[in-house]
């Protein structure tokens, strides 16, 4: 009997929390701006980051893993009694505080293009003024001279290696099509990239910093050329084709166009 009462109590508390988060305008929709950048709750929060206006800074360091965000948050000083921290129910983790007197956020977003799209659009919707976003993560090397432990900066831009899904879905209809598509270069912000590179050289030494082209992949597996006998990925020549088009490509990662 006592267990049943506890369950009822927990259900009631859960419903109360949901009610407190729901933003219901006159149309009785759960969301505001459903076909734009939706928000819900009071104050209205963007759906995936879980943040509202003022909770994320104009300067952001983006990482892929929560433990990395937690580690970097140790360099921040709180703006108030405690460092701001918010973990959303969609897998995003945000810390906001001060670094050298400047407001800075560190956000863990996971991996892949959709997660970066969620982040960039929703952060832009709740931040006023210009933003500077730098992605920090791990990557694979495409050149022998790029040593493990170096920091790579995609100062020459990024290209996307993407699985051509039509090729695999109906090969009889797409005879001769390429299994992977390689995009043109997406150039970074020159000023921000220059600042990142010079700051890294000053902190780590010039021998620890390399610059060039990064290849962003839409998959950690097939689109990075990994061999998996459980799948017909047709990717044995992918790295070779990438380097034929971009001989100076230095890194590859299932992340996003950086800086």
Image (cartoon, grey):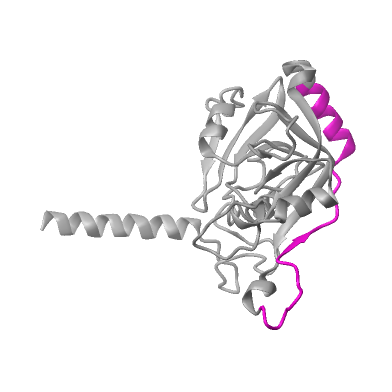
Residue 235 part of the magenta-drawn span: no
Residue at far bottom of view: 173
Tell me: 102 left or right of 248: left
Q: Residue at x 58, y 39 (%)?
A: 94
- Left or right, 188 with respect to 41, comes to right
Residue in the image at 63% along x and 64% along y? 32
Vertical relation: 140 (above or below) 3: above
Q: Please name whichever residue, 44 or 247, is drawn nearer the observer in this view of the structure.
A: 247
* Residue 175 forms part of the magenta stretch: yes
Position of the N terminus by quadrant: bottom left
Relative side of 185 to 115, left or right: right
Please tell me in which quadrant of the rendered image residue 108 appears: top right
The residue lying at 59 percent from left, 65 percent from top is 31
Using the image, determine if residue 101 lies above or below residue 215: above
Image quadrant in which you'd find residue 107: top right
Location of residue 118 in the rendering, given as x and y in whole percent from the top left corner: 65, 55
For residue 95, which quarter of the picture?
Answer: top right
Q: Position of residue 111 (x, y in %)?
A: 60, 48
Which residue is situated farthest in the left direction here? 1
Report the residue that reaches farthest toward the right. 190
* Magenta highlight range: 171-200
Residue 227: x and y in percent read 57, 54
Q: Nearer the viewer, residue 78 or 116?
A: 116
Q: Residue at x 60, y 51 (%)?
A: 226
């Amino acid at each position: 009997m006592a267990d049943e009462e506890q369950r009822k109590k927990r259900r009631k508390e859960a419903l109360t929390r949901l009610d407190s988060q729901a933003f219901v305008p006159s149309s009785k929709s759960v969301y505001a701006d459903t076909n734009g950048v939706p928000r819900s709750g009071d104050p209205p929060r963007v759906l995936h980051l879980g943040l509202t206006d003022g909770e994320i800074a104009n300067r952001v360091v983006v990482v892929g893993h929560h433990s990395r965000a937690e580690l970097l948050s140790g360099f921040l000083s709180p703006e108030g009694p405690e460092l701001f921290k918010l973990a959303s129910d969609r897998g995003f983790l945000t810390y906001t505080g001060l670094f050298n007197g400047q407001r800075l956020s560190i956000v863990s977003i996971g991996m892949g293009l959709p997660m970066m799209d969620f982040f960039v659009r929703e952060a832009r919707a709740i931040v006023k003024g210009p933003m500077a976003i730098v992605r920090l993560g791990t990557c694979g090397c495409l050149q022998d001279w790029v040593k493990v432990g170096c920091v790579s900066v995609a100062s020459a831009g990024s290209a996307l290696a993407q699985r051509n899904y039509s090729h695999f879905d109906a090969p009889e209809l797409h005879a001769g099509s390429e299994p992977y598509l390689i995009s043109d270069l997406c150039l970074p912000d020159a000023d921000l990239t220059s600042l990142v590179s010079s700051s890294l050289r000053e902190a780590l030494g010039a021998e620890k910093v390399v610059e060039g082209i990064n290849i962003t992949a839409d998959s950690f597996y097939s689109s990075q050329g990994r061999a998996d006998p459980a799948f017909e990925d047709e990717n044995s020549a992918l790295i070779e084709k990438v380097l034929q088009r971009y001989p100076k490509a230095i890194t590859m990662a299932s992340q996003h166009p950086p800086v």
